[in-house]
Amino acid sequence: MTQAIKKAVLPVAGLGTRFLPATKANPKEMLPIVDKPLVQYAVEEAVAAGITELIFVTGRNKWSIPDHFDKAYELEAELSKHNKAKLLDLVQNILPPEVSCIYIRQAEPLGLGHAVLCAKPVVGVQPFAVLLADDLIAGRERGCLTQMVDLYNRYNCGVLAVEPVPKKETSRYGIVEIQTIEPRVGKIHSIVEKPAPEVAPSNLGVVGRYILPPDIMVILENTRQGAGGEIQLTDAIAKLLTKRTVLSLEFEGKRYDCGSKLGYLQATVEYALEHPELRQDFERYLHGLMAERLSPAQRKAG
Ligand code: G1P
């Protein structure tokens, strides 16, 4: 029988160098998309997929993450004193009561594989999910992790979320080679971390969502530094493939690479355009801005 996926590991120890100086004292996972920090979107996706135990692998300068998911007595007292019921509800219900958070420190930035390995004592012997918060995924009807859990429940094996990436960008992703077994689903034959376009086995890039069996931990313990001098989750998955089936899922939805400034801005604009309080004003503003910015020639051509 398949074991339910109840635990999710969220590696949040990264230095966020691409967003310096904004991330000098604040974690990149706390950067907001409109009015919610990135990490909250990942947590909401995990909870919607049935996760009840969130394991954050944190590092220095990350105190605001546990604070965000904790009770905020003074703030709550102030909001309730001023009868701000809606806001009070917002801050009190970031997590449903059945969900618990566990924090583990990753002392050194030794890579994603190492971050996942840090969660070994809490993960134990169950299959688990990994979510990278800087990949923000707007699912269509169901979140990306929910789609992956459904596939896991059908096949009882590891699942990686993938999407086609431009060939020239393969060196930014784990790239898989698959055999399609049903629409959007493949059996992964090989996986390689950040290959140059000339040697990439395909253009299917892994995005930051994984469902993995617990034996990945033993493999990680024996995985040496790989690309970029880091202990790579991808290398451990490559070894896992020699004894276990792992599937790829081309999820339905849109991913924003919020680890890059452009992706972050795209997410901000598109989420603002969907935001119930903002969308009308923001759309009007964007139209106005575009009209102002376009040169007369472009305006004519358009
Ligand atoms: C990590 C993984 C990579 C994956 C990517 C998805 O890389 O190592 O395989 O494709 O996340 O976002 P990073 O973006 O942390 O360099």
Image: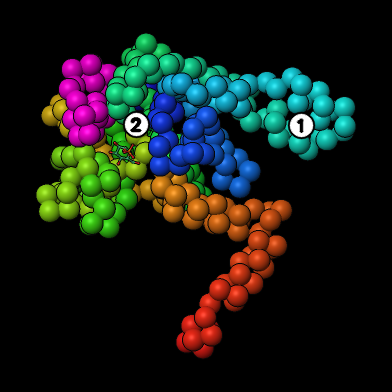
Which mark is drawn over residue 133? none
- Horizontal and vertical percent position of residue 27: 50, 31
Decide whether residue 216 is among the magenta residues: yes
Mark 2 neighbour class, 10 Å CA radius: few under 14, some 14 to 19, many 20 or more: many
Q: Quadrant of ligand 1?
A: top left
Left/right of residue 292 with respect to residue 252 in the rendered view: right
**Of helix, strand and loop, which one carries label 1?**
helix
Q: Quadrant of the N terminus?
A: top left
How is this picture coloured?
rainbow
- Horizontal and vertical percent position of residue 90: 71, 35
**Of helix, strand and loop, which one carries label 2?**
strand
Quadrant location of residue 40?
Answer: top right
**Residue 121 visible in the snapshot:** yes
Left/right of residue 5 with respect to residue 62 in the rendered view: left
Q: To which residue does mark 2 refer?
A: 211
**Spatial CA span between label 1 and label 2:** 34 Å
- Horizontal and vertical percent position of residue 254: 44, 53
Question: What's under tag 1, amino acid-wise?
Answer: Leu
**Residue 48 visible in the snapshot:** no
Left/right of residue 16 with respect to residue 1 in the rendered view: right
The residue that appears at 21% across and 29% down in the rendered structure is 229
Report the front residue among 267 and 209. Answer: 267
Q: To which residue does mark 1 refer?
A: 88
Of marks 1 and 2, the one in the foreground: 1
Residue range in magenta is 211-236
Question: What's under tag 2, amino acid-wise?
Answer: Ile
Mark 1 neighbour class, 10 Å CA radius: few under 14, some 14 to 19, many 20 or more: some
- Horizontal and vertical percent position of residue 216: 25, 22
The residue that appears at 66% across and 66% down in the rendered structure is 285
Report the front residue among 218 and 32. Answer: 32
Disc 2, ligand 1: is the CB inside 8 Å?
no
In the image, farthest residue toward the bottom? 300
